Amino acid sequence: MKKFERCACWSKQLYHKCCQPYHEGTPPENALKLMRSRYCAYALDLADYIIDTTHGDNEHYNLNHDAWRNELHQFSASAKFDGLKIIEFIDGETNASVTFTASIRLGDTDASFTERSAFLKENERWFYRSGEMLD
């Protein structure tokens, strides 16, 4: 993604002022920013960012990072990320949740979904812990 393009998290901000700093190592200040930066990372095929920001307790966490990275690359390459709508953000000191609708297409199939995501803060960093599909 080019510096002066709109961010793929659908924030209407420019990428270099939005998710790029997080993708380059700055920890997001809150769970909402982590959630947006993860959606953007999927759209930009930044598999390592997804791995690095997923909590070890997540059911999809895979200790075989090479295999997981390949799965993430395959998903990102086959998907078109058409939008992100934030429905609710509940902030907390160490636990937070974000409810959102992600508009995604896999080929000709609408794979959009609504999810309530749970986030956990450990060692001053937020991690995606789990998600509950609401559709």
Image (spheres, grey):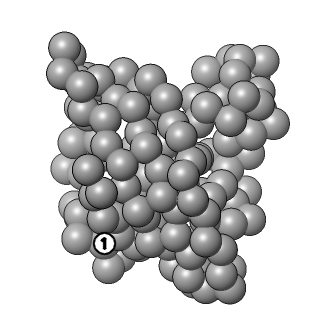
The mark total stands at: 1
Q: Which quarter of the image is occupied by the N terminus?
A: top right
Pick whichever, 134 or 49, lies toward us: 134
**Which quadrant would residue 15 be assigned to in this image?**
top right
- In this view of the protein, can residue 92 be seen by the observer? yes
The residue sitting at 24% across, 25% down in the picture is 110
Q: SS at mark 1?
A: loop
Q: Position of residue 74 (x, y in %)?
A: 23, 31
Can you say whether 26 is above or below 130 in the image?
above
Residue named by callout 1: 58
Horizontally, residue 62 falls left or right of residue 104, namely: left
Pick whichever, 70 or 30, lies toward us: 30
Residue that lies at the very extreme toward the top in this rendered image: 108
Q: Position of residue 107 (x, y in %)?
A: 20, 16
Can you say whether 64 is above or below 17 in the image?
below
The residue sitting at 23% across, 71% down in the picture is 59
Three-letter code for the amino acid on which mark 1 is drawn = Asn
Can you say whether 55 is above or below 22 in the image?
below
Q: Residues within 10 Å of mark 1 (few under 14, many from 20)?
A: few
- In this view of the protein, can residue 25 be seen by the observer? no
The residue sitting at 29% across, 23% down in the picture is 105
Horizontally, residue 88 falls left or right of residue 134, namely: right
Pick whichever, 30 or 135, lies toward us: 135
Q: Position of residue 9 (x, y in %)?
A: 58, 36
The residue sitting at 36% across, 21% down in the picture is 80
Can you say whether 74 is above or below 41 in the image?
above
